[in-house]
Structures are given as structure tokens and as C-alpha cells.
Amino acid sequence: MNEVSLGAAYLGEGRCRFMVWAPLADRVDVHIVAPRELQQTLARGKRGYHHGVVEGVEPGSRYFYVLDGEKKRPDPASRYQPEGVHGPSQVVYNHDFNWTDACWCSTAQDDLILYELHVGTFTPEGTFAAVIPHLDELRELGVTAIEIMPVAQFPGSRNWGYDGVYPYAVQNSYGGPRGLQQLVDACHQKGLAVILDVVYNHLGPEGNYLPDFAPYFTDRYKGPWGALLNFDGPASDEVRRFFIENTLYWLTEFHMDGFRLDAVHAIKDFSAQPFLQELAAAVHRQGELLGRRVHVIAESDLNDARVILPPVMGGYGMDAQWADDFHHSLHTLLTGEQRGYYKDFGRLEHLARAFRAGYVYTGQYSRHRRRRHGNSPVLCPGNRFVVFAQNHDQVGNRAFGERLSTLTSFAGLKLAACAVFLSPFIPMLFMGEEYGETAPFQYFTSHTDPELAEAVRKGRREEFAAFDWEEEVPDPQDEATFRRSRLNHDLRRQGHHRVLYRLYRQLIRLRREVLALANLSKDDLEAIPCGGGRVLFIRRRSGDDEVCIAFSFSEKDTGVTLPVPAGRWHKLLDTAEERWLGGGGIAPASIKSAGEVQITLPPRTCVLFRREKEE
């Protein structure tokens, strides 16, 4: 990869180097519009790169590129868009930030406890700076990494972030590049890693001027969000460079600890060396040079183990992927929903398969897809899967953005927490989940183009028609939709919310201290449906440490025979106990098994037993 970075690089002493890939333009000028005006033509080099050093330019200077003397456009690799997606780009000098994390090396993958948050709705202020006072609470909870939804510049001030059009520019309404650096540095001071959500499968429509510069997009493939990026056609080497360099920019200048790659299944690439494989290799290589662990996590609905297998085994080399099958299995058992993609789930055996493999569908027929789906991830350890009971997609992509707290009982919330955190996978919380936040998380935008705004409204209605929701999807453009989605952190200290928060803390503590729970190996796990398909029995081991877990999804007291191995066992957790606002635990404090145990479980209960060490 070329060492000269794209965009504007301040060299000091009033000198700034500009580089832009614009093969569609014969001439590219840099037009400085503030604080003083000047214009200079860049030299045209190989493969359509235009570059040059301009004198009299300091950090804070604002500029456009002028293509062939006609089109005035912001920089595709702009580091900052202070006036939004249509305004001038700004020269930024990130190297003068006083980092305090010289000894930081990030969190080991097995120790990741992820917390997904949206900067705009996490606090009333909706800024990076406003997140910092909450870091102590997250650390107290047991979180080890925050996963920030996309911060690349999007239109207006309200957006999930997946409509970003300047991959290098930090959203102005969140606090810009300096605000993000301050947040990352503060996280590292608290012992928290930072994972950034990046979007390389599409760009948003408003403010997307890339087609004026170069063939970034292709018409060979069709995607759900418009034109797809050109990762395997003519000129695709330069497209790849643009996005890989973007990832390295976040890693190097913002000290990110990893990345969540949005919807990699929407990236169409049939080359011999896939873009995703090249990206993962570049990120890991740069991490080694910096002496830091870097985690690359993919969102994929393909159930394709190649995503998380190493390149020597024909894989892409991603460190982990979101495990939607686990969520769908758990969600349908808790809510009874069977619409849309949930029609493929709903039986306890589905959740058992998720525990055993990571995927539920490993080649079986999918009713929703009307074809076979997935392959076997038998060679992939548990730490290759990120599991969750909620995330921004599964909450936000509902008619009213309802959280699980409004879809199931308090007992169901406790059961969901236990299923996620007692699994052999990397657990993730969606902001507010730890105390049962009741505010919805709805889809919101602030496009300035009325036709685009109407198209978004229509698209939301059509996208979820398969769910047969009778109510009208809330208007994404209405600011009230955004305001409804803000968290109410005060709930954490009230009533059952406080109890749920304590349960999450306890689960995270047990996961850290009990060897059998800390061991993220699927090989040392058994998952057996019992009680007529109403109770899931899980057995996990690490050396001579062993636990047995019973998850009851029944709506009534259930007598069940569990295949608990012979020996004495003591109870570590029972969500039916009064301290967890249950009706009272029925399971004994200790049991002696000869190979099976008969036990009665209250409705929607989780009980955890640990084998006692022999004297």
C-alpha cells in the first residue's frame, strides 16, 4: 500500500499535502475557502491520483476540490466536515493530541464483554464528551469494551450512522475528531477497549459525491441500500486502498482496539483474494507494528465459517462475527414471535444448537429463505462468536423499536441475561439493556432532501412488510422519533431495574471467576433439551472445574430430570430467589447426583450449579 495517505496531511510550517484519487477528472484544483482564499492545481499521477503540496495552509483551513474547473466537491477522504456533508472539508492535525495510553495493549479476546452504544442517544447531549462520565459505571458493571455505532459523517445531526458518506470524517455533531480522541483516551484510562463500527458495504445517498471522482461503485451487482462498492472490478485496487487505509487511519490516529464490519454479506467480491481477507490482514499487521491487540468482528448473516476461519484454512481471517442465530433462537422462545426471519426458529432445540455450534443453520433448509442455509463452524472456537439478546438492529428494526423489556416479563429478561452471559461465546449488551431500559430505539434520520426523506419512509414500510405489523412505522425524519430513543440512566437505580443491573454484575463476575464459564470452548460443552422441550440443560467444563445450568422457558412450574453427572454440586445462582425478585427458589442449595437429578423449576428460571471439589 502506498505510504502517502489520501486526503489532506498537514506537514507543518503552513504546508499541507493533498492527495485524491480522481481518474474521472483531467484536472483537480484545491480551492482553499477559509480563512483566506487560494487555489492551486494538483499534479496528475499514475492511476488517476492527483497530488501536491500547498503553501499557506494551516490546520482549520477549509477547502473543496474543483474537478475540471466545474464541480466543487468536498474531499472523499475528508477528516472533518464542520458544516455537514455538503460543506467544505477541513484540514485536521491529529498528531498534537496528548495521548495518555502508552502502556495500553487492549483486551484479550476471551475477556471481551462488549457494550454497544449509539453516541447520539446514549446521553441527552449526544456527544463523545457526554459519554465519558458514564465510563466508571460501565467498568463497575464489568464491561471491558464499548462498541460505538458508526461515527463517519452523515447528513444532519440525527442518524444511526449507517448513512455515512465520509468514511474518514468524524461526525461534527458528536464532537469531531478531537472529541473522539478524548473519548478513546478516557476509555483506555479506565481499562476499556474501544471497538468502532465501520460501514464498507455501502455509503449513504445524501452528500455522496464519490461517483464524481472515480469508479467507487459498480452496476454489476445490486444491493439493498443502492449501488454497491467496486471491490472486484476494474480499478478496484484503488477502492480497496481507500477503505483499508481508512481502517488503518482509525487504528493509528484514534487508537481503536478493533472494528465491527457492518453487513459483510452485502459486499459482493468474487476475487481470488477477497477484500475482507486483505482488510483483516492489513489491520492485524498494523496492530502488531503498534504493539496492540486488534479485534476485527464481522456482521454476517451467511452462516459461513469462512468469515472467521484463518486464511490458511481458506477463510477471511476475521476474529469473530455476530451470531444472529443465537439471538433469534432466544428471542422466539421468550416472545413467541414467528414472523419474518423468526419463522425459522421457536424450538428449544434451536437454542441448543446455537450453544453447541454458534450457528443453528449449518446446511439445513430454511423456511424463511426457502433454501438450504449455512455451513458447519465445527473448527471455530466459541470466542469467534458474539452473542446478544438485543442489539441496534434487532431492536431498531421493529415497527416501534421496542426493547425486550416491553416484549417479555422481568423473569424473561433475567433468563435472557443468563443465556447470553453463561454461554461459551463473547457476550454483548445493547446500551441500557443492563437495567432494562424501557425507551425504544427507533430508526431516525435528518435528511435535508424531501424526496429522499419520503423514500426512506416508504423503504422502512416495505422492508418490514414480511412481519405483517399493522401499525405505521414511526417517521424517521420526525425529531420526536429520535428523542424517544434516548436512554434514561436514572432507571438503573430504581426498583426492578436496579435488581436486573445487579444480576448482570453477578453474571459477569461469575463468568470471570468460574473457570468452566471463562473457558470459551464449544468442545467442553453439552446442550440437551429436557422436560418435554421446555428446559435446556447445559454442561460446561474446564479441566476439573465443571458447571451445570438449567434454563426453564416454561410458563409454569416444571418438574424435570436433569442428566447431572455423579457427584456433589452446590448452587451458584438461582434467578427465582427473592433477592432477584423471583417468587422464591425451589432448587436446593446443594445436590448429590448419581447420574441424574429430579428437580422442579419455577417459570422462566435459570439455575447454575458447580461441582464441589473432592477432598
Image: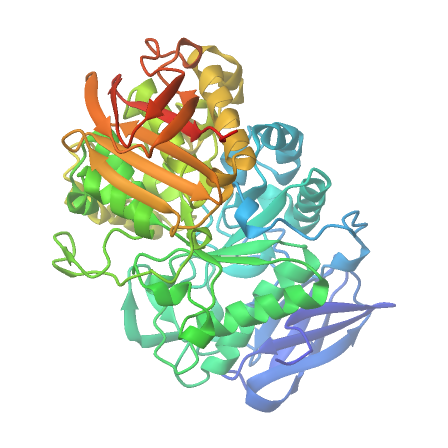
Q: Nearer the viewer, residue 384 or 92?
A: 384
The reply, left or right, for residue 379 in relation to residue 292 is left
Give the residue drawn at x 43%, y 61%.
203
Task: Please state the horizontal and vertical placement of residue 382, each as a whole percent of the image.
Answer: 42, 51
* Residue 133 location (% of width, % of height): 66, 29
Question: Which residue reaches farthest right?
Answer: 13
* Camera-side residue of 291 and 115: 291
Judged left or right of residue 596, residue 414 is right
Write the residue at 29% across / 42% down: 527
Position of 502 relative to 433 (above/below): above
Q: Quadrant of residue 575?
A: top left
Q: Residue at x 71, y 40 (%)?
A: 186
- Is 605 on the left or on the right of 291, as rendered? left
Considering the image in quadrants, where does the N terminus appear?
bottom right
Q: Look at the image and tell me whether residue 383 can be seen.
A: yes
In the rendered view, tell whether residue 44 sits above or below residue 439: below
Quarter-wise, where is residue 96 in the image?
Answer: bottom right
From where the camera sits, is residue 89 visible? no
Extreme-bottom residue of the structure: 46
Q: Is residue 192 above or below residue 137?
A: below
Q: Which residue ends up furthest to the front in the rendered image?
A: 615
Which image quadrant for residue 77? bottom right
Q: Residue at x 34, y 71 (%)?
A: 268
**Image-based side of 503 in relation to 33, left or right:** left
List x then y, in percent, for residue 412. Answer: 31, 24
Residue 433, position in %: x, y?
Answer: 44, 29
Please state which of residues 253 and 595 is positioned toward the viewer in this rendering: 595
Count of numbered badges drawn on the protein? 0
